[in-house]
Image: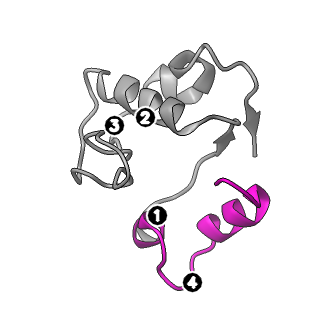
Amino acid sequence: AQRALPARLKRHLAMEKKHRWHIDYLRPHVVVVSCAVACLDRAAECLAARRLISIPEATVPVPGFGASDCRCPAHLIYFPILPPACREPALILPEFRQWSWV
């Protein structure tokens, strides 16, 4: 979110809403375990996606999902078992130290 982050998170976590973003279509089919928040630029989001995709167990269930404005394979990555890096965002992007859990 470029602005109004708390409102955006609240909306994304809601179950009933008008479908507007990619996540809106996915949300009814998943259980949100946690959310990690950091102030990152678009390049860092793509770097995180590439690093996650490089984890051996990672798969891209829907090519291009969440990555319509970049050249990444996707910003939706699936893991059959959550890898340790996904439990601690600083392991994915150690160059960004200020993470918050919401």
Residue at mark 4: 17
Q: Which quadrant of the figure contains the N terminus?
A: bottom right
Q: Quadrant of residue 99?
A: top right
Mark 2 or 4: the one toward you: 2
Secondary structure state at the residue bearing disc 2: helix
Q: Is residue 28 left or right of residue 36?
A: left
Sort mark 1 into few (<14), some (14-19) or many (20+) by Cα contacts within 10 Å: some
CA separation in Å, label 4 and label 1:
11 Å
Q: Which residues are magenta?
A: 1-27
Contact between marks 4 and 3 (CB within 8 A): the answer is no
What's the residue at 38%, 28% (across, down)? 52
Sort mark 2 into few (<14), some (14-19) or many (20+) by Cα contacts within 10 Å: some
Q: Earlier in the sequence, mark 2 or mark 1?
A: 1
Q: Earlier in the sequence, mark 3 or mark 2?
A: 2
Sort mark 4 into few (<14), some (14-19) or many (20+) by Cα contacts within 10 Å: few
Q: Earlier in the sequence, mark 4 or mark 1?
A: 4
Q: Is residue 33 left or right of residue 98?
A: left
The amino acid sitting under disc 1 is Ile
Contact between marks 4 and 1 (CB within 8 A): the answer is no
Residue at mark 1: 23
| Image position, residue 57 (x, y; %) | 26, 27
CA separation in Å, label 3 and label 2:
18 Å
The amino acid sitting under disc 2 is Cys
Q: Is residue 15 magenta?
A: yes
The dot on residue 46 is 2
Q: Quadrant of residue 77?
A: top left
The dot on residue 79 is 3
Please, is residue 94 above or below residue 78 in the view? Answer: above
